[in-house]
Image (cartoon, rainbow, N blue to C red):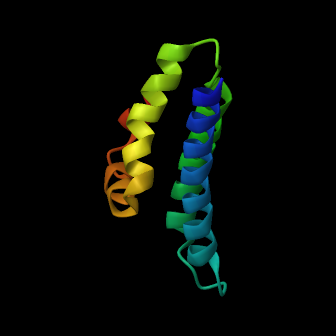
Amino acid sequence: MIQAEVAMELINRARGLLYERIYHLEAGGAGDQRAAKKLDAIAVKLYELLRTIDYREPKRVRAVIARWSPLMRDEEQFWTVLKEGPGLFNV
């Protein structure tokens, strides 16, 4: 169960990074709305991933941790990998 909580925390951290970036993109009214919408769509996918984390599926939980833990330790890598697209969410 603790591993599932760790996995959920990793995904929530990623969502936090996205929403922080969205906020900065939209700030001041002259922000980049297109980029913000793109990131918002990714945040929705992260929320969907978050909802699939279940402590009764330890293999899936470990896969989420293995995929997302390195990205949350290295924010630059997170933004680089985020550009990969949908493959990021296949865990």
Q: As displayed, is residue 36 above or below residue 26?
A: above
- In the shown orientation, is residue 11 left or right of residue 88? right
Front-most of residues 47 and 30: 47
Name which residue lies at 43% across and 25% down. 63
- In the shown orientation, is residue 25 left or right of residue 62? right
Numbered disc total:
0
Front-most of residues 59 and 83: 59
Image quarter hosting the N terminus? top right
In percent of width and height, residue 84 lies at 32, 45
Q: As displayed, is residue 44 above or below residue 63?
A: below
Name which residue lies at 32% across and 56% down. 77
Name which residue lies at 39% across and 36% down. 67
Q: Is residue 91 visible?
A: no
Q: Residue furthest top?
A: 56
Name which residue lies at 55% across and 59% down. 18
Locate residue 17: give its quadrant: bottom right
In percent of width and height, residue 5 lies at 65, 34
Front-most of residues 43 and 15: 15
In percent of width and height, residue 37 lies at 58, 59
Locate residue 3: give its quadrant: top right
Q: Is residue 39 visible?
A: yes
In percent of width and height, residue 44 lies at 63, 44
Front-most of residues 30 and 65: 65
Image quarter hosting the C terminus? top left
Q: As displayed, is residue 44 above or below residue 13?
A: above
